[in-house]
Image (cartoon, coloured by chain):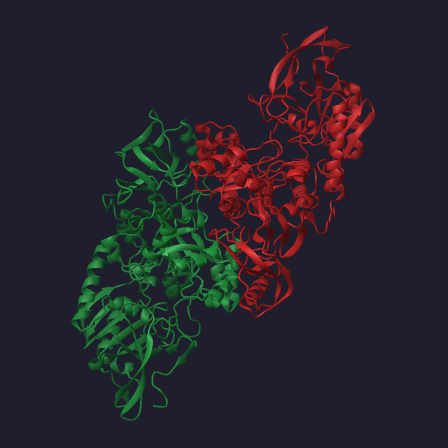
Chain colours: A green, B red
Amino acid sequence: MDPIEVDNIESIIELIEAASGTRELDLIIRNVQIVNVFTGEIKPGSLGIFKGLIASPEINSEAKAKRIFDGSNLYALPGFIDTHVHIDSTLLTPSALASLITPCGTTAVFADPMEIANVAGMNGVKVFIQSGDDLPYHFYIEVPSRVPSAPGLETTGGELGLAEVRAMLDWDSSISLGEIDPSKIIDRKREYLEKVMQAQAIGKIVNGHTAGLSREKLVAYACARIADDHECITYDEAKERLSLGMCVLVREGSTERNLEALVRGLARENAASDRWMMCTDDKHPDDIASEGHIDYMVRKAISIGLDPIKAIQMATINAAVHFRKEHLLGSLSPGRWADILLARDLHDLHAEFVFFKGELVAEQGRLISENISNPFPEWLLNTVKITRGRTAKDYALEATGQRVNTRVIKIFSDQIVNEEKQAVLMVSDGNVLTAPERDILKLAVVERYGKNGNIGIAFVSGFGLTHGALASSVSHDHHNIVVVGADEASMAGCVKAIERMQGGLVVCNGDEVLAELPLPIGGLLSDQNAGIVIQFLKLMNEAAWSLGCSLPAPFMTLSFISLPTVPELGLTDMGLIDVKEHKIIPPIYTDP
Amino acid sequence: MDPIEVDNIESIIELIEAASGTRELDLIIRNVQIVNVFTGEIKPGSLGIFKGLIASPEINSEAKAKRIFDGSNLYALPGFIDTHVHIDSTLLTPSALASLITPCGTTAVFADPMEIANVAGMNGVKVFIQSGDDLPYHFYIEVPSRVPSAPGLETTGGELGLAEVRAMLDWDSSISLGEIDPSKIIDRKREYLEKVMQAQAIGKIVNGHTAGLSREKLVAYACARIADDHECITYDEAKERLSLGMCVLVREGSTERNLEALVRGLARENAASDRWMMCTDDKHPDDIASEGHIDYMVRKAISIGLDPIKAIQMATINAAVHFRKEHLLGSLSPGRWADILLARDLHDLHAEFVFFKGELVAEQGRLISENISNPFPEWLLNTVKITRGRTAKDYALEATGQRVNTRVIKIFSDQIVNEEKQAVLMVSDGNVLTAPERDILKLAVVERYGKNGNIGIAFVSGFGLTHGALASSVSHDHHNIVVVGADEASMAGCVKAIERMQGGLVVCNGDEVLAELPLPIGGLLSDQNAGIVIQFLKLMNEAAWSLGCSLPAPFMTLSFISLPTVPELGLTDMGLIDVKEHKIIPPIYTDP
């Protein structure tokens, strides 16, 4: 991507000529109020653009260009940067995502493709990147540092060892080493430290991930020169991380919404904001469609009292500097990509026009031309290889006697952490039964990479299903099939449907499919456009609710419930996981 | 240098253990007021250090260490960074320089070794770097981008072509591509643009050099994504460069003193200073000894009204971030080098103690142990190879008739620019004579690399010598021997003395040497310590003044007078240079 680096000297030669007035410009955006993110000044002027780059931010009135765009005295500012995002959370391909984020003025995305890497390893990531070749936004990756997340406790389709990570860090499209797990650093795991030092040795930064770390552990983690954190919830946490040399990536996703607390502190103290930037991390397509993307964060920050210039800097140049791309991104300076948004009001900032590499790509909230080419190879469209799980008996949990005391994963609708509870359940024909009337359901994770046919089974409380089952091939971070059901037959129905779709979300009652959303690309992404996916997601939720499910976003909860890295319990294809002890434990207490 | 990067994972593992309290620290600096350059906060505490790195900036009172240093409630701040310096201007080796700058708290130097490169090419730079292996400061180089400075107009000992620059950019000790000449960019010289793009492709920045550029040319120059400029003289110039994406390296050298004007503007507007930093560029050893180094700039900035925290940030973290070394330098964060200075007063900031990589290296203004090893190879100690110039007649300028109208380089004591004047001079025996009574002397540049025996000759006004001659093997940027004299015999005397010394400064009257300072290392650097060099420089100036010289710093003026790149006239071994036309012109008007 961005081949204009060292191999395209002609472009720079011509750019200098265009800036000097000896070569015709491609485009002049006239009559705009140019926001300078370095000085904070706003000056009327015209932007000269050549071959997708800013030639000059101060074109005089005689200059010639192939095209003239009248900016109608709108403000011109650099395109926005999302500094950390799991695109997979949108269920959309990078190209399908454009219709949602490009009209919002997001022109650069630093994506952590951890999900596709868990499914299909380095080759999956490669394909994922290539699918973004014609995007209307810059697409850099944060090289996933922990695939799999819980080695030895889960089966994944792909793995990224040290050799793969080294190779990927060298890619031009790699901008950093992605969110490194604190325990790997604090426990001094050599492989992970080598990844960190490799990134730093070649001039790339290492993104952090410090949710809830104690002060002592934070200091130990910082010893590895971790560059930032996107997990700050309070302003004090943010200051603590800043004081240890980390930048703050303010996060405002669908569920994790940290902007208000953080920016309120920043505004209150009128503190320096040059080491602050913005990210969405995990934001669902319907939420982007309804409220916006980075532009939403900018508006919200300003409404809280942050100076608009500071908010814009956080969304642009601060990110470019931190990720060491300020020579290409984040400002309307000569030589930078002509990623420009035009807006009428800096306090209520909405992009009326968005230019990417000097081309008008969105206007009044709509993408100008959608181009969902899906150059995904066959092998990535056929990743669901099930050995077991098609019949009800595959979900039997064996026990003797009439009743057993079981471990139950108690979930909460608005958190990804859970609690361990106990419940006494009936045994029938040697199988422990669910108790939907007490909201105790079966949860299973079905290995889907054709490697071993594992099925992990446990009990869960909090979904509220009175009958039927839900399943998803999106289940962090291993992305096997996770299924929750009031009965085993419905669970088998769900898994068969997912096998047929080669990935997706499904709601079944017995073998009857009530709703389904195919996600054929690696079992993670739809091949449809954003509008269709959003519509289907709504139908999926309604179908789940019709079965008695009481969660606001059942499939989101489902996709995170199996995580073997979030306390207290996780469930993988290998079984129930005691997260704190990092080991497999039985779902039935052995001493009832 | 700094081998603690990717190849020393053990150090990081142990560092994390030390930070976590499971391994004994090497050093605790107790009882200090720690200045946090990120948050601006100052908090009492203790710094824990292990293997030269900061393990923790908040060691508790029970922690164990091999050594304890009582900080006596002094302020602790990161060591200072000089972001652009020609060490050769001090006439000292990197190791000899330590006695001057280390006690000032300078712990990192980003040096442009352009001079040694002009003398001895890439191998010269390599030796120069290696001589710094045991320095009490970090020594990074800004890879010289223009060696020679004026291709085709001067003979140099070494050249750095594209291949050499590419190779050098890859060195771990290379931090950037050094000050790139605007004309090379604006005139779109492919070789130079390739150097620029190569640096950027491997994640390194490109330093600028924009003295006096018009707005239009500045924009064209910025198209190559030049990262900074150290040539700003006014605050408006600084803002202009900032607005185009360049950082400002405030310069305070011996003659170029820009700090007051720039910082006064910054303080007046209370503007953001995160893209501002400090450099000395060319500062003579006596000036460093008498007033200080970066610490002097910090004190001066504060006395002008800049917030002390901002001044300290400019001298530390801002530089580290801009040069993309913030994971190693510029703050007292975990994992960074333990480069620390302790000071009693932030408003009148003098380093009482200086630690480099966790070792106490200076105390109360004095280096603790001087280590001037001079591992310079024989070939670099024998670089003066003269073919001609040992006799008076080598300095004859032929003419017919009785008198001729000549071009005269009119110099000014406080500027490096000069003016072209005319003078009618007498001819005797076919040789144009000097006219010391009118302050018109002969200036010659004697090729000293044994390549062609060239001698360029012209006339100069402004030195004021009534008799005798001065010469120097330091003459930017080609570093041939430059000699100015009232008579040819004294000029020859000087050149013979320099040949004998294999480089240096000299004052002669006829063959009598009145004073000399040997500079045997490449003809540029002394092998003596700073005290001796400063003492000799004083004697050199006194000897020059005894011959009637009226300049305050005769050898400084002499070393810059031959520059073929500073208007209006230059003089190289090839002859008199019309700088604007970039061509050789005769010293005598052909049509008198």
On the rendered structure, is A572 left or right of B201? left
Depth order, front residue of A418/B277? B277
Task: Tell me if residue A68 can be seen.
Answer: yes
Spot occupied by residue A284 in the image (x, y as percentages of width and height) = 27, 59
Comparing B21 with A422, the one in front is: B21
Image quadrant containing the C terminus of chain B: top right
x%, y% of residue A368?
24, 44
Q: Specify the farthest residue to the top.
A: B402
Closer to the camera, A389 or B383? B383
Where B40 falls versus B209 (above or below)? Answer: below
Decide if residue A96 is on the left or right side of residue A239. left
Q: How many marks?
A: 0
Which residue is depicted at the point 74% across and 40% down?
B531
Is residue B374 placed above or below A387 in the rendered structure? Answer: above
The vertical placement of B518 against A461, above or below, is above
Residue that protrudes farthest toward the left in the picture: A546
Q: Locate residue A537: give its quadrant.
A: bottom left
Q: Residue at x 61, y 38 (%)?
A: B160
Image coordinates for residue B125, horizontal then vertical, percent = 65, 42
Q: Residue at 45%, 62% (x, y): give it.
A: A180
The image quadrant of residue B590 is: top right
Q: Residue furthest bottom?
A: A401
Q: Is residue B177 visible?
A: no
User: Of A24 and A244, which appears nearest the observer?
Assistant: A244
Horizontal arrangement in the rendering, residue A455 relative to residue B540 (left or right): left
Image spot of residue B389 (x, y percent): 77, 24
